[in-house]
Amino acid sequence: MGIVYYGNYAQYLEQGRTEWLRELGFSYKWMEANDVHLPVVHLSIDYKLPAFYDDLLTVKTTLKQLPTVKIEFYYEIYNESKQLLITATTVLVFVNSTTKKLMKAPQYLLEKLS
């Protein structure tokens, strides 16, 4: 059909989060090496227009509020014509990778955000 499969948008959102973290000076890989995992516990996408194969997309990622044991993001994805294709939200939780228990947001992240 020439349109991007709807399930691919979750990967685009992950790329947006990854770059958001990288701009703060962290990476998922670094956080995982420091015993922090961030599983997604909620995903919501509102599809407005389709993306087509070979479109160059822009993922705008915004933190909704300061994290606690969870971190919430809002996203907008645009095509090259600046048309809004989707809006989305995700909720992730901080999990200690050793104990497998919920934990508060790491202090190093909170310091960067304040």
Image (cartoon, rainbow, N blue to C red):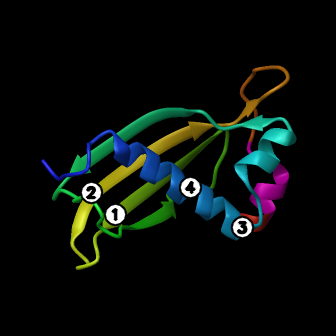
Determine whether the residue tagged by mark 1 lies in a helix, strand or loop. Answer: strand
How far apart marks 4 and 3 lie (CA) works out to 11 Å
- Evaluate if marks 1 and 4 touch, with contact meaning CB atoms under 8 Å apart: no
What is the magenta segment's predominant secondary structure?
A: helix
Q: Amino acid at mark 3?
A: Leu
Q: Which mark is residue 17?
A: 4
- Which residue is disc 1 drawn over? 77
Q: Amino acid at mark 2?
A: Ile
Work out whether residue 92 can be spotted: yes
Of the two numbered discs 3 and 2 on the same chain, state the one appearing first in sequence.
Answer: 3
Q: Amino acid at mark 1?
A: Ile
Mark closer to the observer (1, 3): 1
Report the side of 43 relative to 92 (left or right): left
Q: Tell me which segment is drawn in magenta.
A: 105-111
Of the two numbered discs 2 and 4 on the same chain, state the one appearing first in sequence.
Answer: 4
- Which residue is disc 2 drawn over? 86
How far apart marks 1 and 2 lie (CA) works out to 5 Å
Determine whether the residue tagged by mark 2 lies in a helix, strand or loop. Answer: strand
Work out whether residue 114 can be spotted: no
Residue 7 is situated, as x and y percent measured from the top left of the image, at 32, 39
**Residue found at the very far bottom of the displayed protein:** 81
Magenta-drawn stretch contains 110: yes
Crowd class of label 3 (few under 14; some 14 to 19; many from 20; radius 10 Å)? few
Which residue is nearer to you in this view: 78 or 100?
78
Of the two numbered discs 1 and 2 on the same chain, state the one appearing first in sequence.
Answer: 1
How far apart marks 1 and 3 lie (CA) works out to 21 Å
